[in-house]
Amino acid sequence: MIYLRTASLTAALLIPLLAGCSHLGVSPWERDLLAKSEMNLDAEGVDLTLDDHVYFSKEGTSGGRAFAGGGCGCN
Amino acid sequence: MQLGKHKKISHLLSAAACTLVGGGVQAEEMLKDWDIDTAVLIYNETDRVSAMEGVVQATKDFGEGHIFSGKLVVDSLSGASANGALPQPEAQTMSRPSGKGQFETAAAETPLDDTFKDTRVQINGQWTQPLMTDLRASGGLHLSKEFDYQSIAINGSLAKDFNRKNTTLSVGFSQAFDQISPHGGRPVALSDMVIDSGQFATDQDYWDAFDATRQTAGEDTKNTTDLVLGLTQIINRRWITQFNVGISDVSGYMTDPFKVVTQVDDQGNAVAQTYENRPDSRSKAFFFAQSKVHLDKNILDLSYRYSQDDWGIDSHTLELRDRFSLGGKSYLQPHLRYYQQTAADFYQRYQLSSTALPDYMSADYRIGEMSAYTMGLKYGRELENGHEFSLRFEYYQQSSSGPSSDLPALNGLELYPEVKAAFLQLGYSF
Amino acid sequence: MMTGTFTLHSQGQGTSIKFNAMASPCELLIDTKDPSLVQQLATLATNQVRRIENTYSRYRDDNLCHRINTSQGHPVTIDNECFQLLCYADQCFQLSDGMFDISSGILRRAWRFDGSDKIPSQTDIDTLLPYIGWQKVEFGESFIKLPLGMEIDFGGIGKEFAVSLVAQKCRESAPETSVVVNFGGDIEISRPKHDLSPWMIGIEKPDSENEAEQLIKIAAGALATSGDARRFLLYKGVRYSHVLNPKTGWPIIDAPRSVTVAASQCIQAGSLATIALLHGNRAEEFLKAQNVPYWCSHANSIN
């Protein structure tokens, strides 16, 4: 019963959210700023790779942007 | 081949078109060759590890969304690393992880194993292509090898665009297989470090005692499964945002073979250095949100990550980058990052020898309670030939914390030392 | 003369002007917010487009095209622009070994590309073939003389010509401003933007039934597309494209659904795309030999 209520509540919250998404956004010719390479979400690709390696070996949590993956025995 | 049969008429048509319309400009090269990003990082911790790392990333767009990306990372690391043992009021002697030789720690100093040395080579390859309209697939392979560790991972993801490519939903999967073969072997969990202080009649006696603390069988692999769901949404002409939720399941050997927990008597004097032991499974869940906003003169990049796992580590990470255009082709980008985590349930700074050993324990500060911040500044400049050069400096400071001790021998000793690191990165893209 | 109406939108740092002409949505993207420059270029573009449409459309009965096609074998006086267009069409005819022929339009009397399976009889086609053949047409700087019963059709080059002409007029009137001329997906850029960043242009995919737009990035030069997935005949499992072979009177089989070519001028890109389609299943081979960027969409591809 509680799962059912949670599920329907989630759906009730999520559906307007997704519907709301269709009002967001831009037309193709309005992508001038978004098309800049520095507006890519992973624009700092190489920096993030290096940072991730530092933080991966110093902290208890890693990942989030992409896959945590394996690859290092330092933690 | 019939190819030779076709006349090249494009230049004749071009001439005819010029006559017809007048003027005319040459089309510029529209499909670029390989994009190469390179960087070298020099990393230095105060009194501890120093490292050098190089990255070469190559991306090629084969047109119509077919993209290959490959990455090579090489790094070399050496220096000293805290092995988890407590500082003591007097000097201490401990065995190196290989069993060969010992290292001394001065009174009141945190014991640092100074034989930390490794070289790692990592190769990634990733292929992305459309499957049908607004649906992309991507697959990749990751290999990494270091002296005592190797890893192979595969990943796959699907991304679907909606709402005129303003909304993208993605689902990704990754599976990694790691193999651990530490120098000196894997210690027997919760066994005591053998330290030669003259109690062995012969070398053979010492090595017999040392070998008794080594595992000959058992788990030496680690498998990681990751699942990520992502939503990318363009809000308006200046604002793009992303949300990821994911779970990660790790099983296998996650104990650090070089780390110990000091056992102390009721006065706080060390009586044994006991090899740590961690559970062989770990389940994590995370939430990640990022927004990038293009303002008139600068671009703000703000992200937040919350992560939780069944070891009891909860963490929050907040990160901000602000890219200021300096006019022309150069920019300045300050960077701030704040991180905080709670300790793993089995983290303990030391163990009282009068109480029974728990199943799992670790004094590794990296899974203890901590907070850390990073401050950085990057300068980038596009050169006249279209290449880009960048220089980045970051300062990282980590403060561990935990319950203080009222044991007399530990009075006035620093149980939770700070770690300070600085790194400098040079980048070049062409 | 009709000056036409257009709508104007502010688009980021630039301005977009939209109007309908030549049975297509037409758009100008101008990298400026200067209202007087926008007004000037908008007027220039709409005037040129209406003029070209009025002069060369075969759907009117009061224009030059109509006078030429109803000349009953007599010479018709033409101006220099028409002469240049005929020269260009002649070049295309020569360079394509007679496959690109602006006199082949009368085959439409036999072929109706409405998605049906109505195939004309060989007799129907045979009665039309004697009235096709650009080599039979005489023309000079001030006249054109069609043999009796023949017609010409500028439909294959008119829109691309309009794009290139408007781009050239923009180049002359506003040499410092980048302008994208986009008439129904045929595009030419007057000059690159000052920061050399590409324009992002949404074009309707010629082969999709829905409204999905394809987003392209282009910094300079021109693009043109030939082919139309909605105009075909399906007979005994064979899909006949609306591109007709002027020598046989039959459609080209196995041609790509559409071909997009990039070149420096739109009219050149358009002719290369059309000539490529006329090569049927050897279209890509032909395009490779031209050393121009191109994109083919095939009938069996997933949309």
Image (cartoon, rainbow, N blue to C red):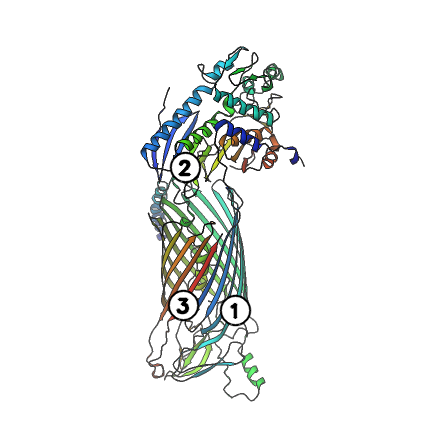
In the image: residue C124, left or right of residue C213: right
Along the line of sight, which residue is nearer the eye, B280 or B198?
B198
Disc 1, SS: strand
Whether marks 3 and 2 lie on the same chain: no
Q: Mark 3 sits on what residue?
A: B421
Residue type of the residue flagged with mark 1: Asp
Q: CA distance from mark 3 to mark 2?
A: 49 Å
In the image: residue C196, left or right of residue B63: left
User: Residue A19: image x %, image y %?
Assistant: 36, 42
Disc 3, SS: strand
User: Residue B419: image x %, image y %?
Assistant: 39, 70
Numbered disc 2: what chain?
Answer: C
Task: Categorize mark 2 by other alpha carbons within 10 Å: few (<14), some (14-19), many (20+).
Answer: many
Q: CA distance from mark 1 to mark 2?
A: 55 Å
In the image: residue C276, left or right of residue B256: right
Whether marks 1 and 2 lie on the same chain: no
Residue type of the residue flagged with mark 3: Ala
Q: Mark 1 sits on what residue?
A: B118
Q: Mark 3–mark 1 contact, CB under 8 Å?
A: no
Which quarter of the rendered picture does the N terminus of chain B lie within? Answer: top right
Whether marks 3 and 1 lie on the same chain: yes
State which tag comes first along the sequence, 3 or 1. 1
Disc 2, SS: loop
Q: Is residue C227 visible to us here?
A: no
